[in-house]
Image: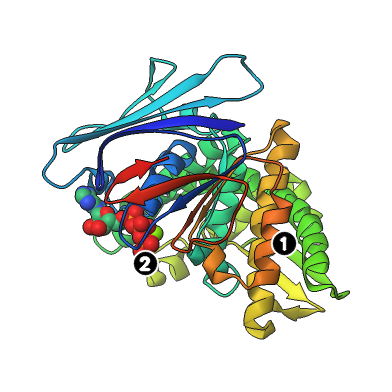
Amino acid sequence: MVCNYIKLKNYRNIEDEEIVFDDGVNVLEGDNAQGKTNLIEAIYTFTTGKSFRAVKEADAIKFGEKEYLIEIGFKDSSRSDIQTLSVGVARGCRRKILLNGVKIDKLSEMIGCFRAVLFCPEHLSLIKEGPSMRRNYLDVAISQFRPVYLKSLQKYYAILEQRNKLIKNAEADFSTLKETINIWSEQLAHEAAFISHIRSRYVKKVEEAVAEYFCEMTDKKENVEMSYIGSSKQSPDEYEDIEAVEKRYKELLSSNIEREIAAGSTLWGIHKDDIEILINGKSARSFASQGQQRSLALAMKLAEGDICRYETGENPIFLLDDVLSELDERRRNFLLCSIKDRQVIISTCEKTYFATSKKIIVKNGEYIF
Ligand SMILES: Nc1ncnc2c1ncn2[C@@H]1O[C@H](COP(=O)(O)OP(=O)(O)OP(=O)(O)O)[C@@H](O)[C@H]1O
Ligand SMILES: [Mg+2]
């Protein structure tokens, strides 16, 4: 997959720009606060449907303006011509998305069209951070090639919200809870079983790729294991059997309601999941060195790209935001060597990294190439 160009109007500090990319390595070079991350943020919006750093979508509208409009042209193997995706956000209005000029109503119809892997300095904490970052890693990665997974996730979180409302309201309105909680629990268990089944399978694939990358990177024969830890506490083999997982979740959600009322929220479900990562049998989160944790995070990002290629038949685009300066020379070379045959867009403040690349100088929201 290749991103041919991006057009931006009133996006963050960018007034009106069109940037054309090469198929290989593209380097965004510039001082701090010039608009490097802003550009990567705009590109990645087409992958996940939202900004990876704006709290509200309207935050990305240029100060003093009413709306932003961004458009990319990209090529994949499904069509011979360039396809376009555009996203427009105006203050106080619904986001407008067009795929090849046709309006898209649901975000889930856009996700998976333009596939990219983002790697930024925060991802280097993927191992030591809390579980939500690892769940997000799974959700973003899987949604790229499995639209039904994304739909199930959206459904799950809508049901969870309703169920949590009932639980929070239990003291004031116990009769509504009694009448309806089972319906919500059953629906929640149904989605949770499907999602954990898919997540567990994905983690197995990630484990294989990560173990290989980690070995190559460290030159040492260390044993890396990764396993999916669902809140129903079943084994990877048990997660293969969706019906059995659904049954387990139904039991958990039907027999612990007093505990949930005391806690004020739903205590079992895929919103509590995690990935356990072990090096030589010891928890990487608790015992791995900072260098090992970084190598693992890097390997997980490379694995995300590999699995995406395996599932879709083509490489996603790699977006590296300021991450090279965070890596030592060995890891930096390893990363660049691992992704050398695909399109990469890299942002950096330093000037020396690449001889064979398209250089784009970023200055105050303008892009010169
Ligand atoms: N909505 C907005 N409207 C106008 N300017 C904005 C908006 N949001 C952020 N900016 C500006 O964009 C600039 C930051 O851009 P960006 O984060 O892309 O910098 P960068 O080049 O990645 O810098 P660094 O090297 O420090 O990461 C800041 O000057 C910030 O004030
Ligand atoms: Mg930046």
Give me the residue at 14% from left, 36% from top: 66
Number of numbered discs visible in the structure rendering: 2
- Helix, strand or loop at label 2? It is loop
Q: Position of residue 188 (x, y in %)?
A: 52, 47
Residue 229 position by quadrant: bottom right
Q: Is residue 119 left or right of residue 338?
A: left
Which residue is labeled 2 in the image? Answer: 264
What residue is pinned by disc 1?
334
| Residue 337 % position (x, y) | 72, 54
Alpha-carbon span between mark 1 and mark 2:
47 Å
The N terminus, quarter of image:
top right
Instruction: Identify the residue at horizontal 57%, vertical 61% (top origin).
Output: 134
**In screen coordinates, is 335 left or right of 103?**
right
Left or right: 31 as drawn, with respect to 330:
left
Ranked by sequence position, the earlier of labels 1 and 2 is: 2
Q: Position of residue 254 (x, y in %)?
A: 54, 56
Quadrant containing the C terminus in the rendered view = top left
